[in-house]
């Protein structure tokens, strides 16, 4: 059973701080990793994708991937109250190389306090 | 110009009824999905179609039947609704069926909140 695990939180950070969200996955051969943000009562919104080891930066967001340790993280710099949401980690399931579906974590709730 | 749209947004119905949810995407994507998000916020894949071909059919009661008349539309019909079907149902699309590498990103519709009483 392929799994994606996240700390459910809530993770509370002050405004302007760096928020660090972590995700571990069990499928050793997974190739694609995604971070989605979901505001309460809204749909998941893609914020980052990462496919190779290392860091990928997009504005205030940095995704980090370490395939050897099977973890992927998301850093949010200069956190704003508008970043308060649930962050979902999703990993493409390899399943005989088909990579047809995402395995989702339960999400980490982030609260940024003014 | 909404990318992925769903109707209705809210659906309240009684046990035993049959209902449908419709989804349309104007992104030109080949692959569409139905997800169920329960009260614990877990996103569970139900079905996926690639250009009208069913490619994912998870362990879902056969009361649920998807239909894709063309690659821009994916509908979900639910027969004999039960209390446990109450959830938010999301439609999503991605450029391609294979999620490895670029092109595997999924884009979600606004969701349909189904309440069965």
Image: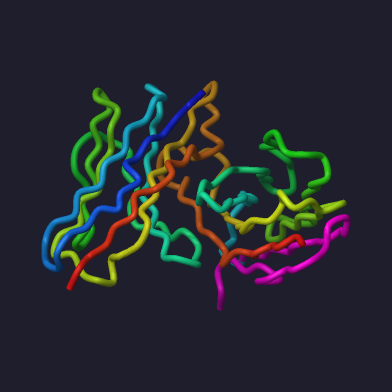
Q: Is residue A77 above or below residue B57?
A: below
Q: Is residue B24 magenta?
A: yes
Residue at 49% of width from left, 66% of height from top? A42
Looking at the picture, tell me which residue is in the foreground, B46 or B86: B86
Q: Quadrant of residue A47?
A: bottom left
Residue at 56% from the left image edge and 67% from the top image edge: B110
Residue at left 83%, top 57%? Answer: B15
Q: A96 or B61, which is in the foreground? A: B61
Inspect this view and state whether residue A57 appears.
Answer: no
- Which residue extends farthest front? B117
Q: Residue at coordinates 65% horizontally, 65% vertically from top-left? A: B112
Q: Dividing the picture into quarters, in which one does residue B88 lie?
A: bottom right
A59 or B115, which is in the foreground?
B115
Image quarter of residue B92: bottom right
Q: Is residue B91 left or right of residue B63?
A: left
Whether the magenta-drawn stretch holds residue B78 is answered as no
- Please report the bounds of the magenta region as a residue range: B1-25
Q: Position of residue A28 (x, y in %)?
A: 37, 22
């Amino acid at each position: 059973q392929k799994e994606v695990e996240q700390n459910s939180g809530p993770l509370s950070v002050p405004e302007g701080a760096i928020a660090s969200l972590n995700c571990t996955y069990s499928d050793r051969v997974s190739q694609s990793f995604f971070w989605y943000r979901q505001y309460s009562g809204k749909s998941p919104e893609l914020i980052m994708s990462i496919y190779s080891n290392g860091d990928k930066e997009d504005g205030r967001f940095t995704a980090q991937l370490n395939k050897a340790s099977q973890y992927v993280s998301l850093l949010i710099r200069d956190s704003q109250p508008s970043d308060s949401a649930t962050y979902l980690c999703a990993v493409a399931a390899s399943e005989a190389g088909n990579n047809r579906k995402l395995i989702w974590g339960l999400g980490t709730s982030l609260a940024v306090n003014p | 110009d909404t990318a992925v749209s769903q109707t209705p947004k809210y659906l309240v119905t009684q046990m035993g009824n049959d209902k449908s949810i419709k989804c349309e995407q104007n992104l030109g994507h080949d692959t569409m999905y139905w997800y169920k998000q329960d009260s614990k916020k877990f996103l569970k894949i139900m079905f996926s179609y690639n250009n009208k071909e069913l490619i994912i059919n998870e362990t879902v009661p056969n009361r649920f039947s998807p239909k894709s008349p063309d690659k821009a539309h994916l509908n979900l019909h639910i027969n004999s609704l039960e209390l446990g079907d109450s959830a938010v149902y999301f439609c999503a699309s991605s450029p391609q069926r294979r999620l490895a590498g670029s092109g595997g990103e999924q884009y979600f519709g606004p969701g349909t909140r189904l309440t069965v009483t």
